[in-house]
Amino acid sequence: MKSVKIMPSKLRGTINVPPSKSMAHRVVICGGLGAGKSSISNIDLSDDLTATIEGMRALGSEIEKSSSGFIINGAEFLDNANAAFTNVIDCNESGTTLRLLIPISLTKENSVVFTGRGNLGKRPLDLYYEIFEKHGISYEYEKDGLNLKIKGSMKPGEYKIRGDISSQFISGLLLALPLLDGDSKITVTTDMESRGYIDLTIDMQKRFGIDIQQSKSREFYIKGRQIYKPTDYAVEGDFSQGAFYLVAGALGNDIKCKGLNIDSLQGDKAVLGIIEAMGGKVETKGGYIQAYGADTQGTVIDGSQFPDIIPILAVLGALSRGTTKIVNAGRLRIKECDRLKAICEGLRNLGADIRELEDGLIINGRKSLDGGIADSWNDHRIAMSLAIASTRCKDAVTIRNSHAVKKSYPGFWNDFKSLGGNADEWNMG
């Protein structure tokens, strides 16, 4: 186990925000389904993305490293569309890999085993099990573990699915259904949470020549026999990761974020509006985005559309005047860890006035935190959030399981130190 000890200091400088992990997953998949070679640049190999790359390779896509990123060719995947395979796909701890690749693995008659580790086996897949039963796809799995065995193929037609558990189920279907030999329709039977991720999926498919029609907010029409066309694409900066530095700016640090697209469809771009709603300022000029603040005030934050940035927004709330209430965030309990409990416990250990609700948090802000020892719960977003909180602590902060950042942002601690963060990481045996 690794831990990091941080002596509180202000962060200052310019950071190149890592490429979007959400968009990278989608471009690797679309390229891996394409009838020819696509060149993908500005892409970082986190643990999650490596799982998707290896999963697409297992399904027949050719993915080779290049000087700028990857060359991806899906011709072999398509040529073998009528062949039967037995594949093992190791999703590691990536829920995105698991939920996006399950439908894709069934676009042809197939026998596939999905494995993983950590909390992944506890994340719900019931929506897919319902589809399997309607389409005659056999499946078996281990309760509270991930050893999912599926056999069969998807058929064109209507798919009714809930939208209030995870948008990844809908994205997985959207990616797979154009490859079937007939037309399909997706009807979402509830309100859609994290809608921005669905928009990202459709936008990426459009770049690869796939047409998804939408006549109502909850209905998607997908023509069959479509072809993913090869394209070249540079992944834009990740607002999920940029949120750590933008909140740091709102807490009084001086950080310019480069590589973020102000016109991005990423749902986590909502961090900009929340910072402004809490009294901070956001400036966009010269190719960078910067947030200012230091005297922000509490507000109500609805976490249903951007759950990934709730931990760092909790940090902002803990250091803002008045009360911040985070609501509609119950899904955070089934992420890499129970993120509501993890960020509540972590910030409380540092001196924050914070308590859990069933689906959110109540935070009474303080001018500064004390410091102390907190655990990341082996969750990358908890570790990075606590690191940003350290910049407004009186005494040292020790974060256990600091290595968790490699799941999405392997270079985080180096970047943190490049901005003036005084962090010393060591193995605890």
Image (spheres, grey):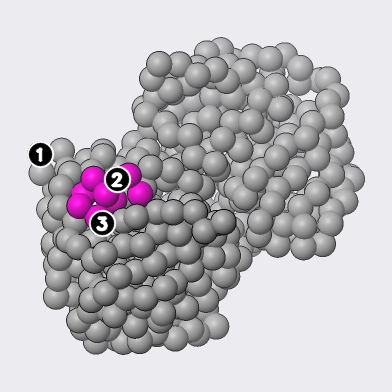
- Find the magenta span and give its range: 413-422
Amino acid type shown at disc 3 = Asn
User: How many angstroms separate mark 1 from mark 2 (CA)?
Assistant: 21 Å
According to the picture, the residue beneath numbered tag 3 turns out to be 422
Q: Position of residue 371 (x, y in %)?
A: 32, 76
**Residue plotted at (38% across, 20% down):** 68
Asked if residue 67 lies in the magenta stretch, the reply is no
Residue at the spot of label 2: 415
Residue type (three-letter) at the residue carrying disc 2? Asp
The residue at the point 59 percent across, 24 percent down is 32
Which numbered circle lies on residue 286? 1
Q: Is residue 305 above or below residue 301?
A: above
Between marks 2 and 3 in the image, the one whose residue lies nearer the viewer = 3
Mark 2 and mark 3: Cα distance apart in space: 11 Å
Residue located 72% across and 14% down the image: 79
The residue lying toward the viewer, choosing from 329 and 107, is: 329
Name the N-terminal-most of marks 1 and 3: 1
Label 1 SS = loop
**Rendered location of residue 56, percent (x, y):** 64, 29
Please name the residue shown 64% across and 14% down the image: 75
Q: 10 Å neighbourhood of mark 1: few (<14), some, or many (≥20)?
A: few
Which of pointers 1 and 3 indicates the residue nearer the eye?
Answer: 3
